[in-house]
Image: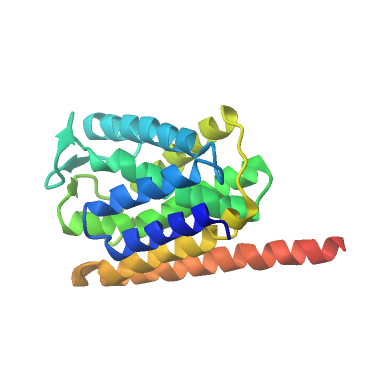
């Protein structure tokens, strides 16, 4: 493994260990700066699209209830135009992890961005219960079908917003990711999901554990399906 990938991976592991600290974001972006030098040169474009589309969606969501449902930022500070400033950066981090994982399995663009958007939804099965337990934001929309109190509309919104910035990224980027980094995608994704479950408040430990289990099942199903497809072609 090349030194830059090793260094970036070390920073990502450290970020997950310090997940409850604001330094989490800083460590991830330091890792991304290193990776963008050689291993994944187009990574900054993905972060930019995720930030732009993610912030626009959050701004729209807090003022018009679309596409997630009605909610309001409360304890998450600082805010800009009523949106927690850290949130668009989180869209970038989670987007990069999900896209890298999807790219490990799919070379076809449509399948890749659809799977990456699905992986984003699975991430939010952990994120939203944790953040609402801290009252980082408060949901006003209630639906009979929900995930531990989170309306189903939120997850549809996550899928659509993720799909939008993944599409824009692929449409306007020349994407080349080193194979050694690609193979680390699922491990980094599992690390994210695992640390969400470990650091979750006791009141929302159950949804984060279930989300972690779902992430394992989803990725393993794709892994075995891809291997079976390869074997059938031989």
The residue positioned 56% from the left and 64% from the top of the image is: 219
Q: The C terminus appears in which quarter of the rendering? A: bottom right
Outermost residue, front side: 3
Q: On the rendered image, what quadrant is the N terminus found in?
A: bottom right
In percent of width and height, residue 23 lies at 25, 53
State left or right for residue 174 relative to residue 8: right
56 to 122, vertically: above or below: above
Q: Please say whether residue 155 is visible from this viewpoint.
A: no
> Which sits in the foreground, 208 or 1?
1
Residue 211, given in percent of the width and then of the height, sits at: 39, 65
Q: Viewed as shown, does residue 212 lie left or right of 134?
A: right
User: In this figure, which colouring scheme has been used for the structure?
Assistant: rainbow
Question: Residue at image x 56%, y 27%?
Answer: 172
Using the rendered image of the protein, determine whether residue 113 is visible from the camera's viewpoint: yes
- Where does residue 103 sit, x and y in percent of width and height? 60, 50
- In x, y percent, where is residue 131? 22, 55
Q: How many marks?
A: 0
* In the image, residue 105 above or below residue 193: above
- Position of 76 with respect to 157 (left or right) is left
The residue lying furthest to the left in this view is 75
Which residue is depicted at the point 54% across and 55% down? Answer: 101
């Amino acid at each position: 493994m090349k030194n830059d990938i090793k260094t970036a991976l070390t920073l990502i592991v450290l970020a997950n260990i310090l997940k409850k600290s604001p330094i989490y974001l800083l460590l991830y972006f330091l890792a991304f700066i290193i990776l963008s030098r050689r291993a994944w040169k187009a990574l900054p474009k993905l972060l930019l699209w995720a930030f732009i589309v993610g912030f626009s969606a959050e701004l729209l969501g807090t003022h018009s209830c679309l596409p997630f449902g009605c909610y309001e930022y409360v304890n998450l500070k600082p805010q800009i135009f009523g949106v927690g400033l850290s949130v668009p950066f989180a869209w970038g981090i989670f987007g990069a992890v999900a896209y890298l994982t999807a790219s490990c399995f799919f070379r076809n663009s449509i399948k890749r961005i659809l799977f990456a958007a699905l992986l984003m939804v699975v991430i939010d099965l952990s994120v939203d219960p944790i953040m609402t337990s801290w009252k980082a934001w408060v949901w006003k929309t209630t639906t009979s079908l929900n995930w531990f109190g989170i309306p189903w509309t939120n997850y549809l919104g996550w899928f659509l917003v993720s799909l939008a910035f993944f599409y824009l990224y692929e449409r306007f980027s020349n994407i080349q990711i080193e194979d050694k980094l690609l193979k680390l995608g699922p491990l980094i994704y599992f690390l994210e999901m695992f640390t969400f479950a470990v650091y979750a408040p006791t009141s929302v430990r159950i949804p984060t554990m279930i989300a972690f289990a779902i992430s394992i099942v989803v990725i393993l199903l794709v892994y075995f399906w891809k291997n079976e497809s390869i074997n059938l072609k031989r």
